[in-house]
């Protein structure tokens, strides 16, 4: 019998999709077939455990009349096999990784800000935890703390802001984090907050009876401390030009507004700033990359330095990009006489690397004097005599030898290898 197109299509579909069961008995048979097939495939891939052997305590839970009921026992065994199936077991190799310290700090600060409990002590603690990760490796963008610190400061009340900006420890932790996260403009805004405060310019003498919290010098010293931290971060990133510009701007501003005083000039942050910039410049020698205009401005503002008369500041003109000069050094050496020991005592308390930088600059000064004219040869010899007297092991060449040979011998002792610039100024 020939099939019609309609019957032919129905027959073809029936082969691809068998008809659904039409009676309860057929439904039961199909369900049993599917269940046994699934259980067989599951047991092949993940063999089930034996609950009677491994979970005796669980099977004992069935008591009373149900204990002798085979249906209850079968149900209990089935539940135990499901609960202890390998698919439901925890894999020890896939435990979640513990949070990094940066993630912990970010989470702690987020939760505190949401609850309105982000005080200065908590923020400072988060920064300390975060810095440990920052110093050891990379931090994911989602856990960076810089923008959180900025948001917290912006949302804080004036009293909290004042307390934060007057806390040297908090600023020491915050500034490196913001620079590492590329938020230098936020630190500049903080400096602007300090500069914009209404500070009456007064004579710093006779302030012993004024409470420390109300002393105008307190906020000036905070400006100086924040400036030092910014200069330090610039030098850490080998940005000597930016560090010099900031020191020059700070010197000009403080002198113009009357903030510069003996108290500020002798303060630890200000001295640390000038020493860091000076040694960074001497370390790079003629490769400092400063323009002649900026170099002249730096030299002009040396009068605001506490150690302006020390030998280190007299070495800076040696590396002027347009007109290198050793005249200040020569005059200092000639006029110092007995006080020259003070200059070298200042050098000897420096770190070993800083001593090498200064001694090498002294040799550069002697070299420059030697190349100028015959009248400067005696000054070059005087510098070498002083250096060799203060550092006897520096050269094994006798004084009667040529000055150039003495310079070469001393330089080889100071720098046995090629002189390499260091990105961070020695403080």
Image (tube, rainbow, N blue to C red):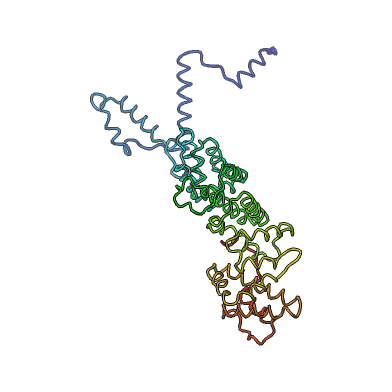
Q: Position of residue 36 (x, y in %)?
A: 45, 28
Visible residue check, residue 318? yes
Q: Position of residue 236 (x, y in %)?
A: 60, 56
Residue farthest along the left direction in this orientation: 64
Residue 70 lies in what quarter of the image? top left
Question: In front here: 346 or 43?
Answer: 346
- The residue shown at (46%, 26%) is 35
* Front position in the image: 97 or 405: 405
Front residue of 19/125: it is: 125
Q: How many marks?
A: 0
Residue 85 is drawn in which quadrant?
top left
Could you say which quadrant of the image residue 19 lies in?
Answer: top right
* In this picture, residue 417 sits left or right of residue 157: right
Say which quadrant the N terminus sits in.
top right
The correct choice, above or below, for 171 with respect to 379 in the image is above
Q: Give the image location of residue 336, x and y in percent.
A: 61, 74
Residue found at the very far bottom of the displayed protein = 400
User: Which residue is pictured at 63% across the width and 60% down the height?
Assistant: 303
Q: In the image, is residue 123 above or below residue 356?
A: above
Camera-side residue: 183 or 140?
183
The percent coordinates of residue 288 (x first, y second) are 69, 61
Quadrant showing the C terminus: bottom right
Is residue 100 visible in the rendered structure shown here?
A: no
Is 403 rendered above or below residue 60? below
Q: Is residue 262 above or below residue 336?
A: above
| Residue plotted at (71% across, 60% down) | 296
């Amino acid at each position: 019998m020939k099939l019609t197109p309609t019957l032919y299509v129905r027959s073809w579909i029936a082969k691809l999709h068998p008809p659904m069961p039409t009676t309860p008995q057929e439904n039961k048979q199909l369900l049993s077939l599917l269940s046994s097939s699934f259980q067989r495939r599951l047991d092949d891939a993940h063999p089930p455990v034996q609950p009677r052997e491994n979970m005796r305590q669980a099977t004992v839970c069935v008591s009373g009349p149900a204990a002798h009921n085979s249906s209850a026992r079968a149900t209990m065994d089935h539940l135990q096999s499901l609960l202890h199936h390998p698919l439901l077991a925890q894999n020890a190799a896939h435990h979640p990784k513990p949070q990094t310290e940066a993630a912990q700090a970010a989470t702690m600060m987020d939760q505190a800000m949401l609850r309105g409990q982000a005080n200065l002590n908590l923020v400072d603690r988060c920064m300390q935890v975060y810095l440990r990760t920052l110093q050891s490796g990379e931090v994911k963008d989602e856990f960076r703390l810089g923008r959180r610190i900025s948001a917290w400061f912006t949302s804080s009340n004036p009293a909290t802001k004042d307390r934060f900006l007057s806390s040297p420890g908090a600023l020491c932790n915050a500034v490196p984090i913001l620079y590492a996260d590329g938020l230098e403009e936020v630190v500049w805004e903080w400096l602007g907050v300090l500069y914009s405060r209404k500070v009456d310019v007064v004579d710093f003498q006779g302030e012993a009876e004024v409470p420390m919290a109300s002393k105008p010098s307190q906020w000036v010293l905070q400006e100086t401390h924040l400036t030092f931290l910014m200069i330090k971060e610039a030098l850490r990133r080998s940005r000597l030009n930016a560090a010099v510009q900031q020191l020059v701007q700070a010197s000009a501003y403080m002198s113009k507004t009357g903030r510069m005083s003996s108290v500020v000039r002798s303060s630890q942050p200000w001295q640390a700033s000038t020493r860091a910039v000076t040694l960074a410049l001497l370390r790079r020698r003629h490769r400092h990359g400063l323009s002649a205009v900026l170099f002249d401005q730096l030299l002009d503002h040396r009068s605001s330095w506490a150690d302006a008369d020390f030998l280190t500041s007299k070495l800076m003109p040696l590396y002027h990009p347009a007109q290198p000069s050793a005249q200040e050094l020569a005059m200092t050496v000639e006029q110092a006489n007995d006080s020259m020991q003070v200059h070298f005592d200042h050098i000897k308390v420096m770190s070993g690397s800083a001593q090498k930088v200064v001694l090498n600059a002294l040799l550069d000064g002697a070299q420059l004097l030697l190349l100028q004219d015959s009248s400067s040869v005696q000054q070059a010899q005087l510098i070498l005599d002083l250096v060799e007297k203060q550092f006897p092991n520096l050269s094994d060449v006798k004084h009667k030898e040529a000055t150039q040979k003495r310079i070469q011998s001393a330089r080889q002792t100071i720098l046995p290898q090629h002189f390499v610039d260091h990105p961070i100024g020695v403080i």
